[in-house]
Amino acid sequence: MKMSTLFTKTLKDAPQDAESANAKYLIRGGFVDQHMAGVYSYLPLGLRVLRKIQEIVREEMDAIGGQEILMPALLSSEPWKTSGRWDDPDCKEVMFQFKGAGDRDVCLGWTHEEIITPLVQKFVHSYQDLPVFVYQIQDKFRNELRAKSGILRGREFNMKDLYSFHTTEEELEEYYDKVLEAYRRVFTRCGIVALPTEASGGAFSKVSHEFQMPTDSGEDVVYVNQAGDYAWNKEIAPDLKDGAMAPDGSGPVKEMKAIEVGNIFKLKTRFTEPFKMTYMDAEGKPQPVMMGCYGIGPSRVVGSIVEAHHDDRGIIWPKSVAPFQVHIVSLSAKDESVQDRIRTTAEDLYEDLRKEGIDVIWDDRTGVSAGAKFADADLMGMPLRLVISEKTLAETSAEWKIRGEADARLVPLEGLMEEISSFVSEK
Amino acid sequence: MKMSTLFTKTLKDAPQDAESANAKYLIRGGFVDQHMAGVYSYLPLGLRVLRKIQEIVREEMDAIGGQEILMPALLSSEPWKTSGRWDDPDCKEVMFQFKGAGDRDVCLGWTHEEIITPLVQKFVHSYQDLPVFVYQIQDKFRNELRAKSGILRGREFNMKDLYSFHTTEEELEEYYDKVLEAYRRVFTRCGIVALPTEASGGAFSKVSHEFQMPTDSGEDVVYVNQAGDYAWNKEIAPDLKDGAMAPDGSGPVKEMKAIEVGNIFKLKTRFTEPFKMTYMDAEGKPQPVMMGCYGIGPSRVVGSIVEAHHDDRGIIWPKSVAPFQVHIVSLSAKDESVQDRIRTTAEDLYEDLRKEGIDVIWDDRTGVSAGAKFADADLMGMPLRLVISEKTLAETSAEWKIRGEADARLVPLEGLMEEISSFVSEK
């Protein structure tokens, strides 16, 4: 993409109420735009990040047998009355409930157990039809009283929700562990550390797991084990203190603030029972279906990545989710023929990279100072910045700088493509 | 995909209220599931079709300079009050309006002029910032009193909406014609004929254009010109009759029922004026921004394709949007070693096709009769069916049948891959 055609521009200032790093940099960089509290538009750069995260999630869900579907957001009240959540005060608080045509009670989807259970039920009759793993990637709605922290806690937000259906509790537990490993892979690939964290299992299970990313801007408090690969939410361990022995006796814990980016739940028969979802076992006897649910918030992951990867100049995107891998900056020169050579060199590089399938943005704007272009590149945060100027062309080179590293160096134009390809493909 | 792992199954009967062909076949084939009137889930097969249509739309929008963004569905009432549509009775009728947290008026997006105008306004200051072309592909909500015709008229439906912003009316008109051509390409690529149709331009323009697909199940009445490439909506030509002279004098028109699958509008200053969106011209004087909007409903296109392409056995998907290009059917045999050979041959073919990047579904189910497998293949409607059975293996062949054509023929296994590749790649 050429920056001269991109309709968004970087902004000098973020809105005053954008306190968190993610809101500040995502708005200033032209990644998102706030429509109202907790509700954002994704602009071209931000949508590219969101899509890359969704694609990582999709690949990992497909790898554990997930079949993708897409449920509606506008929902009938009926299945919620069946499950008892329509009138549950805790649920009512976050559900947008209103009247549709014909004075019918409807609501917006904030989770989809009530929709997926009767849907899968239509296709499951015997033990041979199980297990089933279904997921969707969709916008969800929660009527948060106080939407804050930029895109971390929104009233409308993107969610991947996977639901699994099993014949036995053992099979559910086996799949639950498989999802836990898939989630580790998702977060690692997105460039963040999110720890499996013991949390309340609700009314139907002893524990569930959240995935918590430690960061000072987090809203949750967790206790991280000594190895740094497991944690406990303060909610279920209110007496734990920083430095105290971990519940599993593995050593002292460290108290940290954290952002929840995913969660996994053994629902067992919490929903299959009210919907009377059973299967016929090998003896022809009806048995209850066991169910699990597993969420990741791709839009929240966008914000979490920014919280984890930024400096005082802007965002530092991990390669796997950066809107573009390479940011070419061509500078101006007084001499017109030099100026032409700079532009042609930059354009050739830009076209070569596109042909190679490498995501590249080229700051081809004229009449913008070198300082302003560098500041924009730092704010927008692409992994590799390549500057082409009168100075670099005198050495038949480009200036190579990795975002987040202090040093820049000259790389000869000959062999530059190979070096970029190898930079982009290495993890 | 292997049918043995697909969680959906074909259904013998469609729901009684599924009168239209698209609802009947899409539900029976396991493409969609009805949640409530006018609200559907897309199941794995249906989601693949929807995605392919969206991708065609995306390619054609990108080709005319469109930049993709994603606006929210949950919207503040404020910009609608600015435009005057919050209290407009015609708009109120289709808008879901309700109260959010803090008793704030909110609504669901049914179109996005009120959101895109102030958004683009933030980035447009001078004539050098124009034109801007932005689009999104998103679910929209309309509180239809009578949702009917399957997925053709839904309360929640998928929409591509493009908005363009210009310095002059001439520039707007030029782009409008460009979009019209892009829309022709979209529908042709999706395998349907949708005619540009003159319709009312509303309060702000003399005419607009709808894209109408002639079909008996359509809700609109249009008069098609003699050449069959242009039409007039009855709404703006109430006195026209079948066989009468066309408004442009090109010959007699034919009255037909039709489905609207897209529309394009010159909005001019209808929205930029209330939002005070202006640009500075070369002389530094503020001028009004000219605007256009352009919609296509990908979910409605799914239904329209089925209306246009089916027979009494099921759907006949055009290659470009079929969930899978190839449907392998392996039959059973009494002799176990023959059975093994059938399975191995089918599996090898399946893996080879996947390696080639060809979308293939394999009916690998055991214990299902040949008749039931053929009926499912006809209902599901993939373009090419390949049967592997004891009979075809005796000739070291597979049976080759194109959906919608009567004849089947044997094709030798040697050279089969090449023939499939060439079938898939030809238009």
Image: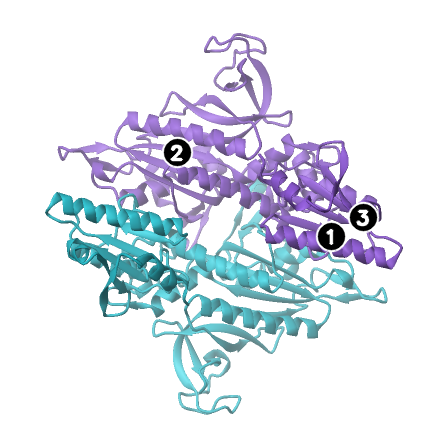
Chain colours: A purple, B cyan
Q: Is residue B61 visible?
A: yes
Q: Looking at the image, is B177 positioned above or below residue B145?
A: below
Q: Which mark is residue A346?
A: 1
What's the CA distance linking mark 1 and mark 2?
Answer: 49 Å
Image quarter of the C terminus of chain A: top right
Q: Chain of mark 2?
A: A
- The structure residue drawn at horizontal position 25% and vertical position 37%, both measured from the top left corner, is A276
The 10 Å Cα crowd at callout 2, few under 14, some 14 to 19, many 20 or more, is many
Disc 3: CA contacts within 10 A as few (<14), some (14-19) or many (>=20): some
Q: A11 or B5, which lies in front?
A: B5
Residue at the outermost right position: A334
| Chain to which the residue tagged by mark 3 belongs | A
Residue B13 visible in the shown view? no
Q: Look at 33% across and 31% down and name the residue there.
A: A270
Placement of B302 over or under A132, stated as above or below: below
Front position among marks 1 and 3: 3
Across and down, in percent, residue A161 comes to: 43, 39
Residue appearing at x 40%, y 63% in the figure: B152
Q: Amino acid at mark 2?
A: Cys
In the picture, residue A132 is in which quadrant? top left
Q: Which mark is residue A393?
A: 3
